[in-house]
Amino acid sequence: MRYLRVKYALLGEELYLAEDVEIVLEEGKVIDIYETSKPTSNVLVMPSLVNAHIHTADYSLLELWPERSLEEIVDPSKGLKIRALEQEDELERYIWEVIKISYKRGTFALADFREQGEKGLEIGLRGSKGFPGYLPFARPPGNIWRAHGLGLPEISYPRALEYARKFKEMGKPVAVHFAENKEEDLDGLLKLEPDFVVHANFVPKESLEELTRRGIAIAKCLRANTWFGLPNNLEEIMEVGTRLLLGTDNAGWTEPEMWRELEYAFLSLRDRDEEMARELLKAVTVNAEDPLKLPWRVPLERDSNWPLLLLNSKPLRYGSSPYIALVKGRLPIKGIIVP
Ligand SMILES: [Zn+2]
C-alpha cells in the first residue's frame, strides 16, 4: 500500500477540488481517498492528460510549407504530407520522440491518427515500443484490426463504412475528421456511427445538437485550425454542451503540448471564468474515457487505475483559482505516477 498526502486533488467526473487529501494506492489502483489532518505536500494531483487527436509522424515534417493551404498539405491521396511520409524512413523515431515529449509534459494517452493504412499502423506500433498510452487510430486499407480504433481522414474515404462497422463489432472506437474546412453531410457522418469527430468547424447549431443527442464527442484542435486560418466555434460547442475533447493535431506545425492547447482554448473564449477552465480540464481528462474507449477508469476516485499527474502547487496564492492556474499552464509538472 502507498499513501499520497497532497494539498489539492481534482476528484471524480467533475474534477471537484478537494484540499488536504490522502490517497491510498494498492495493486495498480486507488483504493481510498479521504480528507486528512496530517501534513500534506505542496502537490496538486489530477488525472494525467489525454491528447485526443494527433498525427505524431508529422514530427518528421517540422515547420514545412507555412504558406501552403490545408488542402495542398493534408489531402489523403495527393497532399504534400502523405507523399513526404511515404519517403521518410525514420518515422518510428519521430513517433517515439513525440510520446516522450508528451509524457514529460503530463500527457499519458495519445490518440495517434496514423496515415498509410496497414503499413502506417505497423510503423506506429513499432515506434511506440509498447507504451501503454499509445492509442493508434488507423485508416484503411489492409489488416488494421490490431489498431486501438479507426481514424478516418474523411467521411467519404474508400471503404469507410465497411471498416467502421467492423470496428464497431469489435467494440473499438470509430473517429473521423469532419467539417474541417467546409460544411459536410451530417447523414453521411451518422451512418458511420462515430464515437467522436475531429474538428467540426463548419457545423450548424442543429447539427451540433444532433451530435450531442447521440453522444458523439468533438475533438477540437484549435491551434492547428488557427494555423490553417479556420474558424473557432469552441464557444458554441460548449454552449450546446457537446462532449468536448482537445487535441494538438499535426505535430509538425503545432507542438504536441496540451498545456498550450488549454491556454489557447481558454483565451479564445469571450466569457472566461473558473467554470470554463474546469470544463476545459475535463476535456483533456475524464471526457475522453467513453469516446476513446479507454481501458482505464480515468476519474480520480475509488477503483481508478488511470495514471496520476502530480504538479507543484506552491505557485498558487490565496484566492487564486487552481483551475485557471492549470489552464494557463502555470503549475510546474512533477511527473506522472502509475497507481
Ligand atoms: Zn487530423
Image (cartoon, helix red, strand yellow):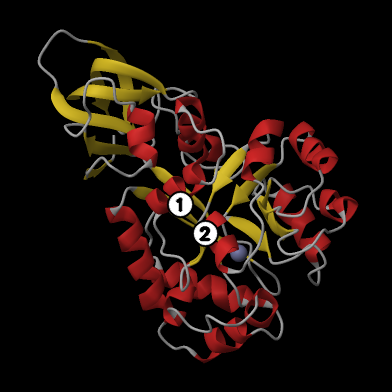
Tag 2 near tag 1, CB within 8 Å:
yes
Which residue sits at x=20%, y=22%? 7
Q: Quadrant of residue 26?
A: top left
Q: Residues within 10 Å of mark 1 (few under 14, many from 20)?
A: many
* Amino acid marked by disc 2: Arg
Q: Is residue 25 left or right of residue 99?
A: left
Rendered position, 171 above or below 62:
above
> Who is closer to the viewer here, 86 or 185?
185
Image location (x, y in percent) of residue 256? 41, 61
- Find numbered disc 2 in the image and state the secondary structure of the residue it sits on: helix
The quadrant holding residue 212 is top right
- Quadrant of the frame with the N terminus: top left
Q: Quadrant of ligand 1?
A: bottom right
Could you tell whether 110 is left or right of 93 in the image? right
Q: Residue furthest bottom?
A: 87
Residue at the spot of label 1: 261
Residue 5 placement (x, y as % from top left): 17, 22
Question: Residue 57 at what x, y percent from top left?
Answer: 47, 74
| x and y, in percent, of residue 92 in the image | 41, 76
Mark 2 surroundings within 10 Å by alpha-carbon count, few (fewer than 14), some (14 through 19), many (20 or more)? many
> On the image, numbered disc 2 is attached to which residue?
223
As drawn, the label of residue 67 is none
Amino acid marked by disc 1: Glu
Instruction: Decide if residue 302 is in sight here.
Output: no
Q: Is residue 61 above or below residue 39?
A: below
Residue at 48% of width from left, 45% of height from top? 267
**Residue drawn where x is 73% and y is 64% of the image:** 181
Q: Can residue 110 be seen?
A: yes
> Does mark 2 have its CB less than 8 Å from ligand 1?
no
**Closer-to-camera residue (309/331):** 331
